[in-house]
Every structure is written in structure tokens, then in C-alpha cells.
Amino acid sequence: MTDFGLKVRMAVVGTILFALYLGAGTALSAMLGLPLVPVLLVGIIVVPAIQYKLGKWMALRGAEEMPEDGQYQQVHRMTESLSRDMGIDKPKLMVMDMGVPNAFAVGRKGAGVVCVSTELMHLLDRDELEGVIAHELAHIKNRDVITMVVGQSIGMLVGYVAYFAVLMGGERNMGTWILAMVASSLANMLVMIFVMAISRYREYVADEDARQAIGSGDPLARALEKISNGAQGRESELDDSMSALCILNADRSIMQKIFSTHPPTEKRIQKLRG
């Protein structure tokens, strides 16, 4: 089980995020003169559904379905075994040239996809690859992709509310329009700080679920070390928007730490081996 402090932090951040969504929905409902419930439903169901479908398509561009024979046969077998142990359907497996060793999962339980890079396949030992696959299956099991999409939709909604609030509250001139754009960006940025915090917490949860699934945290810890070292000096071919999905995102500047989708790799490794 994940530690109690992590659960509390996730609950607090989730509550703040929901409060921002509720406040933005109420404000937008008043601005448009529409009932509150339909506005909230559109913001929490319709918009995320569109983003989910579009995001899944964009993530898998250039990926190919993983053959079930040859070098990939053992990957299918370990994924089938892990999926059964973790109580989910075996996801579709795909492979892609990413430029760096990495992996990501998209979709939900019953319709998930795990994509690994060819660079990762050549780098990791079998038990290390098993740890990575288990981590990605945990994301599907825990509906983490859907959680991130909903969070991004909340950020979009709050940004629109800030934009229209400034625009409707001042004179219709270029200055007001610029101020509205700035307010929208700042509001969206505020929400995304909380969304990224949720993402970092979910990475710890997925690491822990993977550790339980394979019986040890060391294989995944070794995999993270190899992936981190293997990515140095290489240029990722993935779009920057994909970083939240990948098992490793090594951005480490101050601003990147605040908006990072992943905890520091060294902390993840320490917790896996703790």
C-alpha cells in the first residue's frame, strides 16, 4: 500500500482542484446564463472525452503493433501474466522508435495500450522490462491517463473563465484583450501546478503497484537508472506534450520541477529500494 502521507497529499490536491473546477463552472454558468449542471457535465465529460480520443491518437502516431513472435514473444507473455495478476485485461502492445529508451501507457481498463521504445527493448534485462511493463499496467489500472485529461480540462475551463471575466469587465480594446489573455494563461498555469502535483503522486503509486506485482522494487529501480543514463546525450523524438505519459521525464530546472509530471528519478529509486 502507498504511504499515508502520500494519500493525504493526493486528497488535499484533488480537493483543491475540484474546488477550482466548481468555482469556474459556477462563474461560467452565470456569465452564459445557463444552468450550472449542464456546464459542469460538459466540462467534466464532453471536453475530456474529446481530449482523450485526440490525445490517444496523437500519442500512438508512428507506433506499430508489437508482433507476438520473435524477440517480442516474452513481452507478450509477461504482460499477459502481469495483467492477470493485476486484475485487468491484457492491453494492446505497440513498439515505436522514440530516440531514447522509454515507455508509456494510454487508454483505460479494457481499452489500454502500452507502447515501448525499441531503444528500451535493447537496453533492459528481462526482469527490468517486467518492472517497466508493470508500472505502465498500473497506470491503466488506476485510470491515470483519464485523471490527467480531466485535470487538463479543468485548467482549460478555469482559463476560459478568467479570459471572459476580464474581457467582460473592461472596455473592448486591445489592452483589455491582452490582459484577458494574460489572466487566462496565469489561471491555467495555477491549475496545472496542482495537476502536475497529482501526476507526480500517481507516479509513486504506479511504482509501488509495480513493486507489489513483481515482488520486488529493485528491477524497476535498475530499469530507471538505465533509462536515465541511456537518455543522456540523446534527443527524444516524442512531442513535449507526451512527457506526462512516459515512464521517465528528466526535466530538472526550477520551473520544470514545479511543472514536472514526474518526481525526481533518484527519489523514485530510493522509495523502490526502501
Image (spheres, rainbow, N blue to C red):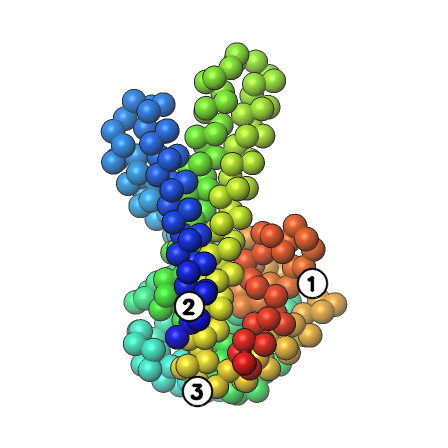
Residue 221, quarter of picture: bottom right
Between 130 and 142, which is closer to the camera in this rendering?
142
Which residue is the site of mark 3?
A: 215
Q: Which residue is mark 2?
A: 4
Of callouts 1 and 2, the N-terminal one:
2
Q: Residue at x 51, y 46 (%)?
A: 192
Depth check, mark 3 against mark 1: the one in front is 3
Cα distance between the residues tagged 1 and 2: 38 Å
Quadrant (top left/top right/bottom left/bottom right) for the N terminus: bottom left
What amino acid type is highlighted by mark number 3?
Gly
67 to 103, vertically: above or below: below
| Residue 252 percent across, percent down from the top left | 67, 59
Secondary element type, mark 1: loop
Q: Quadrant of residue 182?
A: top right
Nearer the observer, 138 or 98 = 138
Label drawn at residue 235: 1
Residue at 56%, 62% (x, y): give it.
262
Query: Is any atom of residue 222 visible in this view?
Result: yes
Q: Nearer the viewer, mark 2 or mark 3?
A: 2
Whether 42 is drawn above or below 151: the answer is: above
In this view, the residue in front, 134 or 114, is: 134
Q: Quadrant of the C terminus?
A: bottom right
